[in-house]
Amino acid sequence: MEMIRNQWYLACLLDELKHQNPLKKKIVGQELVVFKTESGKIGVMEDRCCHRNVNLSLGKVQGETIKCGYHGWEYNTQGACTCIPSLPEGETVPRTVRIEAYPVEVKHQAVWVYIGDEALMSQAIIPPMTELDEFPIVYNYHFLDADLKLVAESLIDAYHINHVHSASIKTFMGNLYGEDVEFNLNIQDKYLTGEYLRHNDSSIWEKLYFGFDKEIKTKFGFWFPHTSKLDIQFKKRRMVIYEHFYQVDEHTISMCQITAWQKIFNEFPLFIFDKPFMLNKSNKIVEEDIVFLENNKRIKDETGKRDILIQSDTVTFEFSKLWNRNLKANTVGYDEPVEAKDKE
């Protein structure tokens, strides 16, 4: 599969730039360096000093520039070289001495970088991740050898939760039984959103804290090609999970899972371990997913067999149509899933 370009990608969370050290990233095959200057400007550029082609991420941020660690050449956030220490006195840095800088947006406590044809930039979207502006969050990166499409769908797949996450989530998010589930989908050109109800099978202790409502409202969303959302809404509390994913290279996918919450710990104002607790729980949930995502990729690669979907896979049908419709502009030869015509 070719890399999906002409998109805004999440380069990093603002939290990652706290100490003004340059960050090394690789997104859809592009080696990048992300840095924040002393005045707060953020640059995302190719991770290369044009002098000897070493990584700028090996250097350091100094004032308003990033300084190469090899010979001290300095670059501003636009990619222009502003200083060459060994340049003879009286000479100026040639304007042609520069590296590629990428368009940057700072939104939802994150740095977004556009990779691709800038003439198509207006057609790309940044998901409305407004909860990250309002709620406490934790995040972590995971790297896996998996099918990008399956990774994209994993978070919005309602039926896997009680099976894959029976040891971690347990009854916390309720349950889906055998009857038809009404997903109430809203399908747009580049994204879909929806909601459904899960039966509240929580333990008595969970119900005392989260509420005795018979059903738990669950919202979800997917924004092509890189972001999925799961939003669990209790009567007075809420937990929102985002996953942002992209190909690093031909074999590796990066997934950043971000968990935000509202009033989960409000009864415990002195509870200082809320973020470590949530991060540990989030990591465990992702690790459970990764086992199956990588296994699916291996089986497909070895057998060449495609997925078979059944009538209850409503969200998967619509997700697949949206995915393949948008994918055509970037790749060719993608296999469609096989629909099961009859139920056994």
Image (cartoon, grey):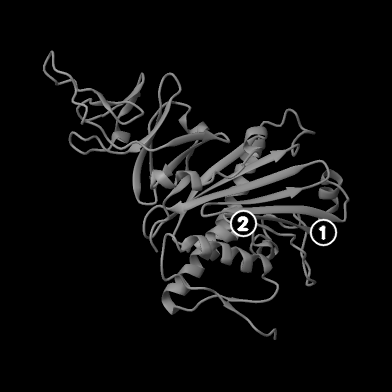
Is residue 148 something that shows in the picture? Answer: no
Mark pair 2, 1: CA separation: 20 Å
Q: Position of residue 93 (x, y in %)?
A: 19, 23
Between 72 and 190, the residue placed more toward the observer is 190
- Say whether disc 2 or disc 1 marks the residue closer to the N-terminus: 2
The amino acid marked with disc number 1 is: Asp
Counting every numbered tag in the picture gives 2
Between 101 and 46, the residue placed more toward the observer is 101
Mark 2, secondary structure of its residue: loop
Between 190 and 75, the residue placed more toward the observer is 190
Q: Position of residue 255 (x, y in %)?
A: 50, 51
Res. 201 mark: 1
Q: Is residue 79 above or below residue 89?
A: below
Q: Position of residue 105 (x, y in %)?
A: 49, 35
Residue for badge 2: 155
* Callout 1 crowding tier (Cα within 10 Å): few <14, some 14–19, many ≥20: some
Is residue 272 something that shows in the picture? Answer: yes
Residue furthest top in the image: 90
Left or right of residue 182: residue 36: left
Give me the residue at 81% from left, 49% from top: 206
Left or right of residue 324: residue 187: right
Left or right of residue 58: residue 93: left
* Callout 2 crowding tier (Cα within 10 Å): few <14, some 14–19, many ≥20: many
Q: Position of residue 291 (x, y in %)?
A: 53, 63
Residue furthest front in the image: 119
Mark 1, secondary structure of its residue: loop
Left or right of residue 333: residue 176: right
The amino acid marked with disc number 2 is: Leu
The quarter of the image holding the N terminus is bottom left
Q: Is residue 138 above or below residue 205?
A: above
